[in-house]
Amino acid sequence: MCIRGLKSVVLLVWMTQAVVTTALADGEVVPEHEKVITSQLGINGPTDTHGIAASEILGSVGLGDDFPSLQGRSLRARRVTISPGGVVGVHQHDARPGVLYMLEGELVEVRSDIEGAISRKKGDTSFEKGGVIHWWRNDSKKVATALVVDIVPDNLK
């Protein structure tokens, strides 16, 4: 999907849903079962998520009416802010494809499907598909904010 298409999807989600701000504990940024799967695979990386300044659900929309094969799944948009020194611990995208779009700041991503660490800056995207194991860290002295759009089970929206 191109950036223009991604922006259209995000705008649609935003227009159809009220903005809901939630105060999530740091560990709730990543679904628990994704952390468990990763630990069972013996993947190295920081397991502790910390330094999440905010995680706001911007909206979600059920997909089952338009796509019967996606019954029980929703398209969700979140704005996630990570403090300097913050980490999103290692996890696997288990049937939760998504796109991260950097709004401000810089994050370092380490992924199982790409060698070496990747610096993601304002305007950059990261596509996360099933089977991808990765983690994020904010090595800068400024907050980093990203728009995260993913397809999730309805119980996670």
Image (cartoon, grey):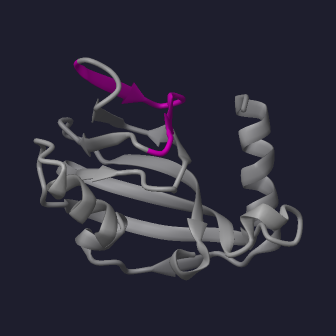
In-front residue for pair 100/63: 63
At x 29%, y 31%, the residue is 112
Q: Quadrant of the N terminus?
A: top right
Residue 128 among magenta residues: yes
For the record, the magenta segment spans 116-130
Q: Is residue 58 left or right of residue 53?
A: right
In-front residue for pair 95/145: 95
Residue 146 image offset from top left, x and y in percent: 47, 47
Q: Main secondary structure of the magenta part?
A: strand
Q: Is residue 77 left or right of residue 52?
A: right
Total marks shown come to: 0
At x 49%, y 69%, the residue is 56
Q: Is residue 120 above or below residue 102?
A: above
Residue 8 image offset from top left, x and y in percent: 81, 45
Q: Is residue 100 above or below residue 116?
A: below
Residue 62 among magenta residues: no
Residue 14 image offset from top left, x and y in percent: 74, 64
At x 42%, y 51%, the residue is 93
At x 27%, y 77%, the residue is 25
Q: Quadrant of the C terminus?
A: bottom right
| Direction right: furthest residue | 66
Quarter-of-image position of residue 152: bottom right
Residue 43 image offset from top left, x and y in percent: 15, 43
Quarter-of-image position of residue 135: top left
